[in-house]
Image (cartoon, grey):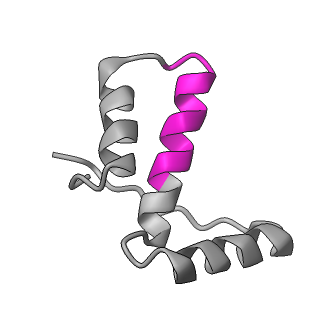
Amino acid sequence: MYRRVCILSEIPEDLQKSLFEFLDGHPSWDQDRVFSAAISLFLLQNGKKDQTTSRIYLDTLFDSVV
């Protein structure tokens, strides 16, 4: 079972525009899926190399339920 954390964050306008364009072109993705993929990849690249983080990243990429 996953514990959800609500994150309210401001992002640069250009990044937000790119996110909206991506989401418009990829209907199977939503904001939550993008952020889950981005955060888990960031953690993997910065030292959090564990099985759980890896599984979340791969599940998110391959559209498994997270």
Name the residue at the left extreme: 1
| Horizontal and vertical percent position of residue 8 | 59, 67
Q: Main secondary structure of the magenta part?
A: helix
Q: Is residue 22 left or right of residue 37?
A: right
User: From the viewer's perspective, is residue 3 above or below residue 55?
Assistant: below
**Residue in the foreground of this view, choosing between 13 and 10:** 13
Q: Residue at image x 31%, y 20%?
A: 51
Q: Residue at image x 35%, y 38%?
A: 58
Does the segment drawn in magenta span residue 9? no
**Residue in the foreground of this view, choosing between 47 and 3:** 47
User: From the viewer's perspective, is residue 34 above or below residue 47?
Assistant: below
Extent of the magenta region: 36-48
Name the residue at the front extreme: 25
Task: Answer with the quarter of the image where residue 33 lies.
Answer: bottom left
Q: Is residue 10 left or right of residue 47?
A: right
Q: Is residue 53 left or right of residue 47?
A: left
Task: Answer with the quarter of the image where residue 11 lies.
Answer: bottom right
Task: Answer with the quarter of the image where residue 53 lies.
Answer: top left
Name the residue at the bottom extreme: 24
**Residue in the foreground of this view, choosing between 1 and 41:** 41
Q: Residue at image x 41%, y 79%?
A: 27
Does the segment drawn in magenta span residue 46? yes
User: From the viewer's perspective, is residue 49 above or below residue 11?
Assistant: above
Q: Is residue 48 left or right of residue 46?
A: left
Q: Residue at image x 54%, y 36%?
A: 41
> Which quarter of the rendered picture does the N terminus lie within?
top left
User: From the viewer's perspective, is residue 7 above or below residue 45?
Assistant: below
| Horizontal and vertical percent position of residue 35 | 52, 56
| Horizontal and vertical percent position of residue 14 | 84, 72
